[in-house]
Amino acid sequence: PDADSATRPRVSVIGTGYLGATHAAAMAEMGFEVVGVDQDPRKVEALSAGRVPFFEPGLPELIEKHVASGRLRFTTDIAEATAASDVHFICVGTPQQATSFAANLSYVEDATAAVARNLTHRGLIVGKSTVPVGTAARLRLLVARHVSSSIDVELIWNPEFLREGKAVDDTLSPDRIVLGGASREAEETMRTLYAGPIGAGVPVISCDLPTAELVKVSANAFLATKISFINAIAEVCEAAGADVSVLADALGHDVRIGRQFLNAGLGFGGGCLPKDIRALMHRSKELGAHRAAGLMQQVDEINMAQRQSVIDKTVAAAGGSVLNRRIGVLGVAFKPFTDDVRDSPALNVAAALHLRGAQVTVHDPEANGTARSNFPTLSYATTARDAAIGASALLVLTEWPDFGAVSPDELGELVENRVVIDARNCLDAARWSAAGWRVIALGRETTV
Ligand code: NAD
């Protein structure tokens, strides 16, 4: 061991999904000894062998590197991992509850209580999961109930802003580091852990617990609002004969607005934005913040209406019914560069058309497997060509760059009708139109 290993905190990461596996690998890359804990033995087995059970660019290489270097290991045994570490990151899921819009906090509570119960020496518990404001304060009480009275423990919040598909870069060089509720000592420990990014100029924002929890939630709420805003404007564009893509480009030149998250289309999905805005809606109501709740309600409604609009356009394009019609679908991941289909608008539309009696064949470069395990009754094709065969309509539902590159001439030979519904406004409409396709987009005129 090198000279400063005695002062270097050892890290445990509880929950090794998208967030935890990436965080664990990044902490190892920053030079720390890390143990990842998950209750799912298959995940632990895969990660221990250097395999990542989901698609995330750059992550397999990093996991493999540090499993091999011995700095990173995985276990299902939280007692052993807690005893072997000093800082414990809580990275478990906070999904939407089955019966309401509130977040299900049982995983966070269980993981935090388990760490507290198993602490054998002084520890710092660091929440990273996205939680409704007020959760961390309650977790502090939970920790106090479970920890042995002789052990010194502190709980702080350090929300995570990584994006799936760019998770490794986002974790190694985040835009900012938010530390909520940290004592001077805890802040010093966190500054040691994040010395790499801080040294590279990443700003640290120290604040109270509720502010830290809300920074994350409002970042997602703002991004979701931007998407629903442009989709609301797309509705006006369609009615008025304007082109929302040109409009968004023009808007985006204003640095106060910015071009990102202004793509009109099928709307947002995934394991974060939808459940986070709903959790904010629920929590705002509890707190009596009714205007915030109302805003989130509108953002959610506009978003869900986009899915219905694409279903309606498909049915109309098929002449009023999709029963027994073949529909080719390009893209089921909730966004490109991921295999994640949690609350995927694309999979949602594909499934809805299937339930209306269409024969839906889906192709996604990465997400066929995850989609199949969620929705086994759709047909899955390994190429865009195979998905297009005999199709009454072709739907582009995720903006993978691969789909921009497919040849409309080639696909035109395979389909029954040259009708493409570009639900992400990502195709070169003029090129498809020149190849004889009717291009139906969102928020702009149909190109015939
Ligand atoms: P995930 O479902 O991929 O991973 C959660 C993991 O925690 C699972 O592997 C599960 O088996 C494990 N787990 C649950 N309870 C456990 C326990 N008691 N002990 C040990 N392991 C346990 O979820 P995720 O996408 O990684 O999200 C985790 C949290 O991070 C959520 O709050 C999410 O909102 C937040 N977040 C996610 C992202 C993202 O892009 N995925 C980005 C920022 C924040």
Image (spheres, grey):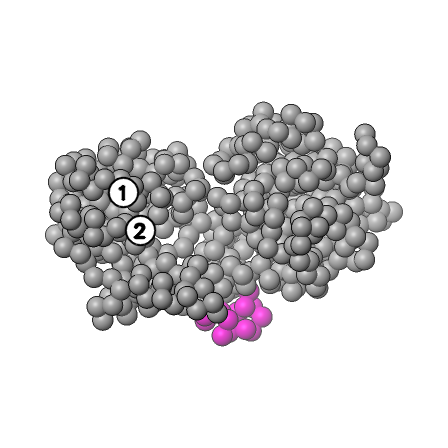
Q: Is residue 270 left or right of residue 60?
A: left
Amino acid of disc 2: Cys
Q: Nearer the viewer, mark 2 or mark 1?
A: 2
Q: Nearer the viewer, residue 397 or 324?
A: 397
- Pointer 1: residues within 10 angstroms few (<14), some, or many (20+)? many
- What residue is drawn where x is 65% and y is 46%? 90
Q: Would you say the beta carbon of the disc 1 residue lies within 8 angstroms of ligand 1?
A: no
- Label 2 with label 1: CB-CB less than 8 Å: no
Q: Is residue 230 above or below residue 350?
A: below
Residue 398, x across and y down, in percent: 35, 47
Q: Nearer the viewer, residue 421 or 317?
A: 421
Residue 437, x across and y down, in percent: 16, 48
Circle number at residue 426: 2
Residue 352, x across and y down, in percent: 28, 48
* Magenta stretch in the rendered image: 283-295
Circle number at residue 329: 1
